[in-house]
Image (cartoon, grey):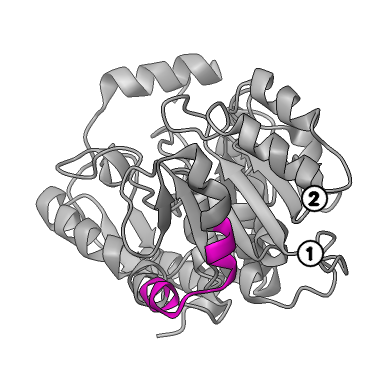
Amino acid sequence: MNYLTATKNKKYLMYISQNYSYAILRPLQAQILAHGGEVRWFLAGSEVNPDFLTTNEQRLHTIKDVKSWIPNITFIPGNIVPSFIPGKKVAVFHGFNSEKRSSEGNRGHFTIRGCYDLYCTQGPNTTTRFKELAKQHGFFKVTETGWPTLDPLFSNTSNNPYVSDDPRPTLLICSTFSRKLSLAPKLYEQIKHFSEQGKWRILMQFHPKMPAEWVNKYKALSNESLTFIETDNVLPLLQAADVMLCDTSSVLLMFLLLRKPVVTFCNQKPLPHLLDITDADEVEAAIEHALTKPSDLMQNIKSYCQELHPYTDGQSSQRVLNAANEFLQSNEKLKPKPLNIIRQLKMRKDLNYWGW
């Protein structure tokens, strides 16, 4: 059933704590505004930069402001949200299940922290597990919608600043921040060589928590072949590249959804949809192989994407908004969420809020 018309005159809060959350929620914001709803942003903590807000986006500065505004629904791309934030709390995720940690039991991507009323999942390989957990816990619902972040990924690239008429293949290098998993400390000499060699146009982008030491070292490599980019929106970079070099960062999964090959270095779970390398000296040959788009690899990527995120219509934001409105209108009775006293006290301390 279509619940998009129920958006009119309702209030939606975007609760964020990282800069990358802007790009996650903006396609959803566009749908809310297009259907007559109101949007406000609340920036929690010191790691999110208010300068990324546009002149048309409205911010609530304090918890008191949020409680006075009284949102109907709060969307959260992070792991936690305080219970004292008003509105039905909808998880939209900050990335895919990248297997950085075990996802067995209640760990990793499937950790249930008792904060959410509704999980909007990205595809079958997460929906099935979350629905099992919903049945087990009883205090949240699950609807598969696709990920709103990706809606612009499937649009045209006519205004993409990273698309170039440079005839060389474009290599995108991304890395997570964990020293154990990051390729940055382990492939510095190889990447320096690639930048000097000049046979590829290289774009580099790191996780925002990457240590400054490595950010600065790689920035220093910048030349006509290598461009280091700091951005809150990685999607145009994904669209502009031919091949990605990565480690165990979830950004590689978004790249795969464009049906493009990824070379990984020491990936935590090197399945057949990846070209995984464990020897630094073999990275260059693996990239060259990936550029040929071998048929067996491309078929493995296609099959994997059908489980990960089968939606390529750019309408996941509509599905999320529809699911949230349906949940709100259904007024379904669920079990009470756990009290989480210690976590709630910590969030109160972090936000310096001690009211009701």
x%, y% of residue 271? 31, 58
- Magenta span: helix, strand or loop, mainly? helix
Q: Is residue 72 visible?
A: no
Residue furthest out toward the bottom: 1
From the image, tell me which residue sits under label 2.
198
Tell me if mark 1 has few (under 14), some (14-19) or many (20+) residues whose alpha carbon lies within 10 angstroms of its own: some
State the residue at coordinates (79%, 64%). Answer: 168
Residue 211, picture quadrant = top right
SS at mark 1 in the image: loop
From the image, tell me which residue sits under label 1.
168
Tell me if mark 2 has few (under 14), some (14-19) or many (20+) residues whose alpha carbon lies within 10 angstroms of its own: some
Q: Earlier in the sequence, mark 2 or mark 1?
A: 1
Q: Is residue 278 left or right of residue 259?
A: left
Number of marks: 2
Q: Is residue 210 left or right of residue 264?
A: right
Alpha carbon distance from label 2 to label 1:
9 Å
Q: Quadrant of the N terminus?
A: bottom left
Q: Is residue 68 left or right of residue 322?
A: right
Query: What amino acid type is highlighted by mark number 2?
Result: Gly
- Provide the residue span drawn in magenta: 287-301
x%, y% of residue 284? 58, 50
Query: What amino acid type is highlighted by mark number 1?
Result: Arg
Please say whether residue 298 is one of the residues in the magenta stretch: yes
Q: Are marks 2 and 1 in contact (CB under 8 Å)?
A: yes
Viewer-closest of 3 and 313: 313
Q: Quadrant of the C terminus?
A: top left
Disc number at residue 44? none
State the residue at coordinates (67%, 71%). Answer: 36
x%, y% of residue 25? 60, 55
State the residue at coordinates (36%, 73%). Answer: 300
